[in-house]
Image (cartoon, grey):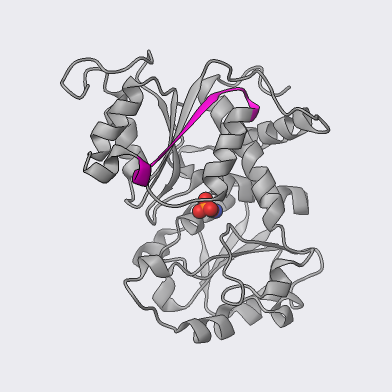
């Protein structure tokens, strides 16, 4: 595996191996006062974020540092992107500066894929001369969220959380609720969970479903109250107002009443069921504050798993499949 751009690139075996590797890293670090493994000593990873982030950027940085990599954070606002430098020139500059991995978040769907293509081209320096310091086709590129397309490491950490809470994924019924239309998390989760054997149900108003949803490996429902008693896990999504050009239908209040996970709705779930949210949460909108803080809700476990999953991904891409945390 050279890059991680889409969960579609993962097989059942390779996804399961990443989840297993993440748990091995968790075990390797358990109880250690100093969380430092030598695994990526001498490697340079760069987070390149053109959209805001708390969880993804921080957990990649923690993951890299816990494996002794040199981690450099680049944001659009503090880089020469703010002076008008192009995405290609930015990517090629970071490659020439010695990046072994580029972790990319960008508002355009396909941006990480495009960067992987540009930086793989040995002869494509800024001025046509060879730019790369990394032999064998440029840095590994990890998609940390591209527009409304995909967020593969989020889906992996969500799958790990479901597996830890329920014991398995295959045969489980998992609902993804809310703003599917604008959600890269929904697409990556639907593909990965279905690949790992879960039955995936999307619950959303018709206005917040993408046109192409008929091609997804899912069932669609508009009735959250009818679905909740039959679920093993429910993944609540944030309503992404920033991608809606000023307004959405139904209104925030209507949405909260019709699709929000209230305390009453939490009690419709079976006792064993788990509630997930990728964050950031809008308390009082898609999830009630009491539900967000309920023991049924795994939000902080998801964040912790995010560090271990990202360690596993960095390890797999930069070192290979032998000799990880074990
Ligand atoms: N889940 C997620 O991607 O959160 P951030 O936007 O804070 O990284």
The image shows a total of numbered marks equal to 0
Magenta range: 66-78
Q: Please give left or right for residue 87 compared with residue 148 in the image.
A: left
Q: Does the magenta stretch include residue 38?
A: no
Q: Where in the figure is residue 99, as x and y percent of width and height?
A: 41, 24
**In the foreground, 11 or 29:** 29
> Is residue 220 visible in this depiction of the protein?
yes
Q: Where in the figure is residue 113, as x and y percent of width and height?
A: 34, 38
Q: Please give left or right for residue 312 compared with residue 116 in the image.
A: right
Instruction: Name, please, the residue furthest toward the left.
Output: 127
**In the foreground, 6 or 314:** 314
* Residue depicted at x 32% and y 20%: 96
Q: Determine whether 93 is above or below 223 in the image.
A: above
Residue 286 lies in quadrant? bottom right
Q: Determine whether 24 is above or below 196 in the image.
A: above
Q: Determine whether 58 is above or below 254 in the image.
A: above
Residue 315 lies in quadrant? top right
* Residue depicted at x 57% and y 66%: 201
**In the foreground, 47 or 232:** 47
Q: Please give left or right for residue 121 compared with residue 212 in the image.
A: left
Q: Where in the figure is residue 25, as x and y percent of width and height?
A: 71, 30
């Amino acid at each position: 595996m050279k890059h991680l751009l889409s969960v579609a690139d993962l097989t059942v075996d390779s996804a399961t191996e990443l989840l297993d590797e993440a748990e091995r890293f968790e075990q390797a670090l358990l109880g250690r006062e100093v969380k430092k493994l030598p695994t990526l000593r001498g490697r340079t990873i760069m987070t390149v974020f053109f959209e805001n982030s708390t969880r993804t950027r921080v957990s990649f940085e923690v993951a890299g540092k816990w494996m002794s990599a040199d981690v450099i954070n680049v944001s659009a606002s503090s880089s020469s992107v703010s002076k008008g430098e192009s995405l290609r020139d930015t990517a090629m500059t970071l490659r020439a500066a010695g990046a072994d991995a580029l972790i990319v978040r960008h508002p355009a769907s396909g941006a990480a894929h495009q960067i992987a293509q540009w930086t793989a081209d040995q002869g494509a320096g800024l001025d046509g001369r060879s730019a790369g310091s990394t032999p064998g086709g440029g840095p590994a590129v990890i998609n940390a969220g591209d527009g409304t397309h995909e967020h593969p490491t989020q889906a992996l950490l969500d799958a790990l959380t479901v597996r830890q809470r329920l014991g398995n994924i295959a045969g489980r019924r998992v609902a993804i609720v809310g703003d599917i239309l604008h959600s890269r998390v929904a697409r990556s989760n639907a593909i990965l969970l279905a690949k790992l054997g879960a039955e995936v149900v999307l619950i959303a108003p018709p206005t917040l479903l993408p046109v192409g949803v008929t091609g997804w490996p899912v069932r669609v429902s508009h009735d959250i109250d009818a679905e909740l008693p039959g679920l093993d896990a429910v993944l609540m999504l944030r309503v992404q107002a920033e991608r809606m050009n000023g307004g959405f239908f139904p209104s925030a209040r209507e949405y909260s009443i019709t699709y929000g996970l209230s305390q009453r709705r939490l009690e419709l779930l079976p006792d064993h069921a788990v509630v997930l949210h990728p964050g950031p949460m809008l308390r009082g909108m898609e999830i009630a504050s009491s539900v967000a803080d309920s023991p049924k809700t795994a939000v902080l476990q998801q964040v912790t798993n995010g560090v271990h999953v990202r360690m596993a991904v960095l390890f797999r891409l930069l070192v290979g499949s032998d000799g990880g945390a074990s």
